[in-house]
Image: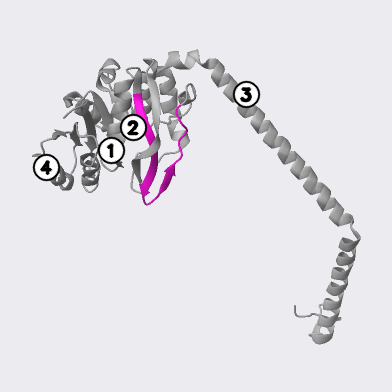
Amino acid sequence: MSGSLVSVVIPCYNYGNFLPEAIASIENQTYSNWEIVIADDGSKEETLKVVAKYESHPKIKILYLENGGPSRARNLAINAANGKYILPLDADDYISPTYLEQAVQLLDSNPKLGIVYCEADFFGEQTGRWDLPEYKFPNVLLDNCIFVTSFFRREDWATVNGFDESFEEWEDYDFWLKLIDLDREVYRIPEILFHYRKGHVSRSVRTNLDFLPVFARLIKNHRKLYSENTLFFIEKILRQREDLMEEIHELKVKIVAHEKTQDAILRSKEFRIGYYLLHFFSLMKNRIKSLVFPSSGKISKTGELKNEYKS
């Protein structure tokens, strides 16, 4: 086998029914110099039976762990890996056949390149393109656009001490910022090569408010990156304020136009005629009722005849 070895690390927690599809997508790669390290993160017996089927596979290594979360599972898998390049892949996702080949060519040709990823789509209960903005610095400091199934160098992983296992969410975002802080370049392959499963229970089902404490911690961890780009954030806020003021102005214009239209309608000859016709028909309706439904003939407390009509 020629070319740099790629280690695909797969943390697996009770996803035994999805795991074969993920592994098959590696076996079907056009690039052959790869290994897989499965880190079973304390799965139940059903998944363990699936994982055990790969114990005799010549290119698959399996770690059986106590449950400790995906960051710990990835770190232990990478520590046990031999590859020059690392690709994390969740057990419920899969990749297209040329992803490894294209990424290795890019990483081999540019030693400054530290992160290689691609375009992606959804499959499962939800399908369609995953519309993520292309990587651009410093925009990435506000919104992560790099999913975890992206390539990086094992030596860079060691330099930044891997994934921060204390993160319950956004551990990949934190990791990418560590590599960016090493002045590593980032490249997105302009092709859909990663396929992300949607439709089952996932850590991703969260609201933006849930992530505010995590984002605050992210800023604290990468204070240098964020402080050096303070001007960018100020400009971003000012632009958002200008956009908001413009939207408010447009809304005011629409309200004034609506009020003018409404006032014009109320003052129009057609509206006045229609109003009087409606009033006339209402009077006629009441008159017809009085003719069709005679008095009930009830006597009031004063002894006078009281007319009551059924509606």
118 inside magenta stretch = yes
Label 3 neighbour load within 10 Å: few <14, some 14-19, many 20+: few
Q: Residues at badges 2 and 1 in contact (C-beta under 8 Å)?
A: yes
Check the image and name the residue furthest to the left.
56
Amino acid under disc 3: Leu
Mark 1 and mark 4: Cα distance apart in space: 18 Å
Name the side, left or right, on which 188 lies relative to 289. left
Mark 3 and mark 4: Cα distance apart in space: 56 Å
**Relative to 300, does residue 1 appear above or below in the rendering?**
above
The residue closer to the viewer here, 304 or 176, is 176
Residue position for label 3: 238
Label 4 neighbour load within 10 Å: few <14, some 14-19, many 20+: few
Residue position for label 4: 52
**Residue segment shown in magenta:** 115-135
Query: Disc 2 or 1, which lies upstream in sequence?
Result: 1
Give x and y (percent) for residue 278.
84, 69
Res. 185 image quadrant: top left
Q: Report helix, strand or loop for mark 2.
A: loop
Q: Residue at x 18, y 37 (%)?
A: 42
Q: Residues at badges 3 and 4 in contact (C-beta under 8 Å)?
A: no
Q: Residue at x 65, y 32 (%)?
A: 244
